[in-house]
Image: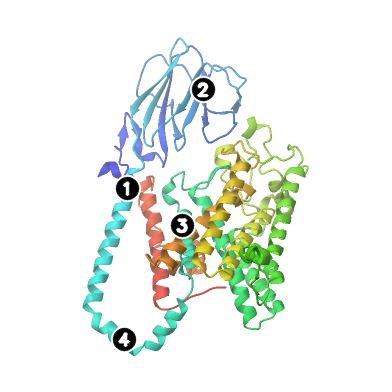
Amino acid sequence: MSQFTEYVEPTWRGLNMRQLKVDEAYLIAKNFYHKVTYLYTLSEQCYTCPYTKVKALHPQQTNDDNITHLTTTLNVAYNMNFKLFDYDAGRYAFSNETALCISEQRHLKEFGVYNFTLNANGTCNWDIDKDGVNIYYSLLSVFLLVALILSILKISLCAWRSYHYEEEVLENVAGSGTTAGTVQQRNRMRSLDVFRGMAIVLMIFVNSGGGDYWWIEHAPWNGLHLADVVFPSFLWIMGVCIPISIKSQLSRGITKAQIAFRILWRSIKLFCIGLCLNSINGPNFENLRIMGVLQRFGIAYLMCGIIHTVFAKKDHLEPQVTWRRALYDLISFKGELMVAFALIVIHLSIVFGLHVPDCPRGYLGPGGKHANASYAGCIGGATGYIDLQILGSSHIYQHPTAKYIYDSKPFDPEGIFGCLLTIVQVLFGALTGVVILMHTDWRARITRWLLWSMFLTIITSILSEFTKESGVIPINKNLWSLSFVCATTALAFTVLSILYYIIDVRHWWTGYPFEACGMNAIIMYVGHTVMHKMLPWHWRIGAMNTHFLLLLEAVWNTLMWIGIAIYLDHINFYYSL
């Protein structure tokens, strides 16, 4: 069982193995060369970066395994490259500098001990002193453990229901009025609530650490990891509900002015709640972060809600011409599409046209040591510059993902300028809602959603050129780039199509338990943010330095909130702003 929980011996050749953190290993660098050398490393995730100095290695005369002053810890989440120089190249070593020894693309394992030896003749070699652990056994063990617990609970629940079957039948007969109301309440597309519920559950899991696996966390800069699809999915499904809500209000005789005021009031509440959550560690106005997840929700909802309210019609007369009838959803949504296109043009014009001091025009990189540290202060190019000018350096996010790989400066991934394309993403969601309203046949709905998914996938491929780093506009969540919007929206179209087919069309799945989570998403989001460091949602056992423990805690916290959502659904308590 020890191999499934990343257990290691307490000590190894005098090294304290329990002091290592998640994704760390020991590197014993032995220098038998006649002079001081300098060790530099480069992570494979750091695109076009120079090597970074780790430490100086002084010569040693004997092969003494107890010499610990040559030992250093390395983060081994990503593959690494190594170089040794016989001179101090400074903080960074660039490609034009001659190295004494080069060792490329080493895959080091967590909790391993590795020897990197520089021989007297200037050659170097690697040796595995102690092999690391397989971090993915923890995924399997936690999955089996949770599956066992849920199976026991399911069997217990079935046994309880079987024992109390007659009592439940009598209660349902006596409370037939309430049951009818509940059935009426559920007479809507379950897949929408399930989609939202899956998004909030995944968001809680990711915000709880996700076991500290690199592919679950946000991408350092370009690329798409699991955590990167959560926020855009949430925004997109919010857009789906906008036309459905507005049409319902118009049909009840509510004026557009009243609808616009309700949208404004809800947006203000979202923004204010997000601002309050940013002050959870203390309301220091000097460095209070202004923007955030709910703030961007509020801005996107305000703009998209008002835009659709302006163009919305109370009644729709279906055209008689065949081709116009087939495209009627697009025709009725043409005003919103024109606004979306205008926002894309404005965004791209500013990104590639604005002059940013000391930065190349159209720069989309993370700054820091990217591009051989040529543009250290240019994180995000025009996007970062505009947010910095409007918000100030003290009121933006201080710990972006790029900081730990690229040594980048502060940057807000939920900043103001990125809201332009966020609005576009929510408008794509609104188009989905219009398709639901215009077409009652499930084949027509799914066909349109999948066609949009294919179209946006093609656009993503063209913009990113099928690469992570080399495209004209790489997929980038931090910048909320156009390719990122297209990729995540295409994914949302596809996922909703699948959920709609298996839940609302074929009834193969009721959506349990995600439907209950989707109907109280705001409670789950705010609740898990406020309770982030509190029992019983979170706990710590010892150093918490294994993926197993961190994953177990993240899963526990997520299951706790799923249980709360199920209970709220059971008592018919639903809250929305």
Q: Which mark is residue 83?
A: 2
Quarter that holds the C terminus: bottom right
The mark that comes first in sequence, 3 or 2, is 2
Q: Amino acid at mark 4?
A: Glu
Q: Between 557 and 448, which is closer to the camera in this rendering? A: 448
Nearer to us: label 1 or label 4: 4
Residue position marked by numbered label 1 in the rendering: 140
Marks 2 and 1 sit apart, C-alpha to C-alpha, by 36 Å
Q: Secondary structure at mark 1?
A: helix
Q: Is residue 142 above or below residue 164?
A: above
Residue 158 location, quadrant: bottom left
Numbered disc in front, either 2 or 1? 1
Q: Amino acid at mark 3?
A: Leu
**How dense is the environment of label 4, judged by Cα within 10 Å: few (below 14), some, or many (20 and up)?**
few
Residue 202 - label: 3
Q: Amino acid at mark 1?
A: Leu
Rounded to the nearest whole Å, what is the CA distance between mark 1 and mark 4?
Answer: 42 Å
Whichever of callouts 4 and 3 sits on the residue coming sooner in the sequence is: 4
Viewed as shown, does residue 457 lie left or right of 131?
A: right
Which is in the foreground here, disc 3 or disc 2?
3
Tell me the SS state at disc 4: helix
Q: Residue furthest bottom?
A: 174
> Which residue carries the number 4 mark?
171
List x then y, in percent, for residue 38.
Answer: 52, 22
**Label 3, label 1: how far apart the Cα atoms are:** 18 Å
Label 1 neighbour load within 10 Å: few <14, some 14-19, many 20+:
few
Up-down relation of residue 261 to residue 209 (above or below): below
* Residue 397 picture location, percent across and down: 61, 51
C-alpha distance separating marks 3 and 2: 40 Å
